[in-house]
Image (cartoon, helix red, strand yellow):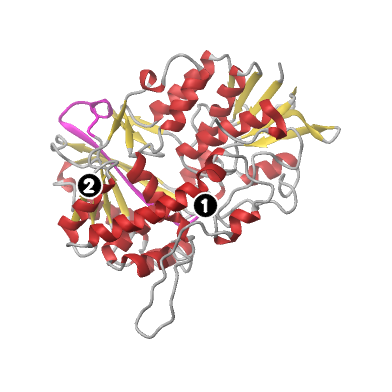
């Protein structure tokens, strides 16, 4: 039985802890905050309950596998999952609207044809077929296997099979970025907005994201979008309780200040009170800036490895408590597309544009879940927008977002009881990520800019887990990182991937 010290109680760290405990190891999780879950948070007030992190689950198979591998009770006995229908409703800049069915690529094509005109569904479906090829080529190395030592192969090879397009007398072109794929292969600005909204939700610039980012809408439309009764925090609770059932020890309010080394390897942790706890392995589920401080190194990964990404976009969340019942057949998630994509992208990834936050692509979440409201005569609504790293959001910009949400939430102004705002500063306080940065999923191509550092590090005995390491951000990716770290510790360097 090895002693494992885990730093942080985020989803990836807890997934690793549960698997390691089942393998017979003694696991102690040290969390500086007072609770578990990391970015998967919630807030309750006056009988209202809101998610403050992820609002939907994609690839639930990752957590089903975790629960199967760590106990007799399957995931569905621990949380109540439901596919949301429709998966999303979109309101485009020209006023056209479309509802996209859940996990039905044929249904999505039919819906697009009906809403946007004949032929749009076929173009989108053909694009998703090419996205499937990119998914098939990258699924194992980006989700199920430790990052290859020769990761440069993933960086140089673009897995998306771009279609050669000739425009009038111009030379034949092939898309290398997501924005180019939208322009050349989709054409219709509404389809382009639909495509790019998936990149924006992940904090990616479609102008520089590789064409392989097509896997993001492919994953959602193929595997579905799922809600959790009582909020996504219930998933975090279920993973936490599975850890407890496997005799993982949690110590909250326990801040790690240093990773102790001995004979050239990680040998334990030092806490803020000066005490030291020995360990055979240390698993760190913290942002790269924090890990660098703990190791007194600019980065614990070996020279030549994938560098940690910094200054990532953050998220703004506005919580709205409303009087009045949620109307029947209201979409769970509505996306209001911006009228000025160039200004939005400049504000996020380039030159700041005053007032751009208020005009950003806005997601309006209206769950039909009675567990989240005081009674059937009230409604809990969450607004989310991707914002720049460390953005200082003004009250006027929040007002503008709420005003825009009123286009799809009937009588919002008159129904509003109160609102709360979660800015990048609150994200930073909850997760430790400088500027409230939110890591994106790993993607192949783009010279390796969207890969993440490996789970094993240059310091033997130290492993990185969670969204800041391979395979990147997002609930399914966090779960997979836990699986990969557990495999590396249990099986050693010979471990080649999840089975």
Q: Residue at x 16, y 28 (%)?
A: 376
Camera-near label (1 vs 2) is 2
Residue sitting nearer the eye, 180 or 8: 180
Magenta region: 368-390
Q: Is residue 80 above or below residue 408?
A: above
Picture coordinates of residue 357, whole percent (x, y)? 36, 59
Picture coordinates of residue 210, whole percent (x, y)? 49, 60
Asked whether 295 falls inside the magenta stretch, the response is: no
Q: Residue furthest bottom?
A: 169
Quadrant assignment, res 310: bottom right
Residue sitting nearer the eye, 20 or 205: 20
Residue 436 visible from this viewpoint: no
Picture coordinates of residue 367, whole percent (x, y)? 25, 36
Which numbered circle lies on residue 207? Answer: none
Q: Which of pointers 1 and 2 lies earlier in the amino acid sequence?
A: 2
Which numbered circle lies on residue 443? Answer: 1
Element on which disc 2 rests: helix
Which numbered circle lies on residue 107? Answer: 2
Mark 2, Cα crowd under 10 Å, few <14 / some 14-19 / many 20+, is some
Mark 1, Cα crowd under 10 Å, few <14 / some 14-19 / many 20+, is many
Picture coordinates of residue 178, whole percent (x, y)? 43, 62
Residue sitting nearer the eye, 483 or 92: 483
């Amino acid at each position: 039985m090895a002693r494992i010290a885990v730093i942080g109680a985020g989803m990836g760290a807890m997934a690793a802890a549960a698997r390691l405990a089942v393998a017979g190891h003694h696991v102690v999780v040290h969390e500086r905050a007072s609770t578990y879950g990391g970015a998967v948070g919630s807030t309750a007030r006056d009988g209202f309950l809101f998610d403050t992190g992820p609002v939907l689950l994609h690839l639930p198979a990752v957590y089903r596998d975790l629960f199967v591998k760590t106990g007799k009770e399957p995931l569905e006995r621990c949380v109540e999952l439901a596919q949301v229908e429709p998966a999303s409703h979109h309101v485009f800049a020209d006023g056209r609207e479309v509802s996209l069915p859940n996990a039905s690529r044929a249904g999505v094509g039919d819906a697009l044809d009906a809403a946007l005109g004949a032929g749009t569904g076929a173009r989108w479906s053909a694009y998703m077929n090419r996205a499937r090829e990119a998914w098939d080529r990258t699924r194992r190395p980006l989700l199920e296997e430790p990052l290859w030592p020769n990761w440069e192969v993933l960086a140089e090879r673009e897995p998306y099979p771009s279609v050669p397009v000739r425009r009038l007398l111009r030379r034949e072109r092939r898309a290398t970025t997501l924005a180019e794929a939208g322009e050349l292969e989709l054409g219709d600005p509404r389809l382009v907005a639909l495509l790019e909204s998936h990149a924006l939700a992940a904090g990616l610039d479609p102008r520089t994201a590789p064409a392989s980012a097509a896997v993001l809408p492919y994953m959602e439309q193929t595997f579905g979008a799922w809600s959790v009764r009582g909020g996504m925090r219930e998933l975090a609770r279920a993973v936490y309780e599975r850890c407890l059932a496997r005799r993982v020890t949690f110590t909250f309010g326990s801040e790690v200040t240093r990773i102790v080394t001995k004979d050239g390897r990680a040998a334990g942790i030092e806490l803020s009170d000066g005490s030291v706890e020995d360990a055979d392995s240390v698993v760190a589920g913290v942002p790269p800036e924090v890990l660098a401080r703990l190791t007194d190194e600019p980065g614990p990964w070996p020279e030549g490895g994938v560098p940690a990404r910094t200054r990532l976009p953050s998220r703004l969340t506005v919580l709205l408590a409303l009087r009045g019942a949620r109307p029947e057949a209201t979409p769970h998630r509505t996306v209001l597309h911006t009228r000025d994509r160039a200004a939005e992208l400049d504000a996020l990834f380039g030159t700041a544009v005053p007032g751009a936050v208020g005009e950003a692509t806005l997601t309006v979440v209206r769950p039909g879940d009675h567990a989240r409201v005081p009674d059937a005569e009230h409604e809990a609504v969450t607004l989310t927008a991707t914002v720049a790293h460390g953005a200082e959001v003004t009250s006027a910009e929040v007002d503008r977002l709420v005003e825009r949400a009123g286009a799809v939430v009937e009588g919002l102004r008159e129904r509003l009881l109160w609102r709360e705002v979660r800015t990048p500063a609150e994200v930073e306080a909850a997760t430790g990520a400088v500027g409230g940065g939110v890591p994106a999923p790993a993607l192949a191509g783009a010279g390796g800019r969207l890969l993440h550092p490996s789970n094993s590090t240059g310091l033997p005995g130290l492993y990185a887990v969670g969204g800041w390491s391979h395979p990147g951000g997002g609930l399914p990716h966090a779960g997979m990182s836990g699986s990969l770290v557990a495999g590396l510790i249990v099986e050693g360097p010979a471990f080649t991937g999840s089975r």
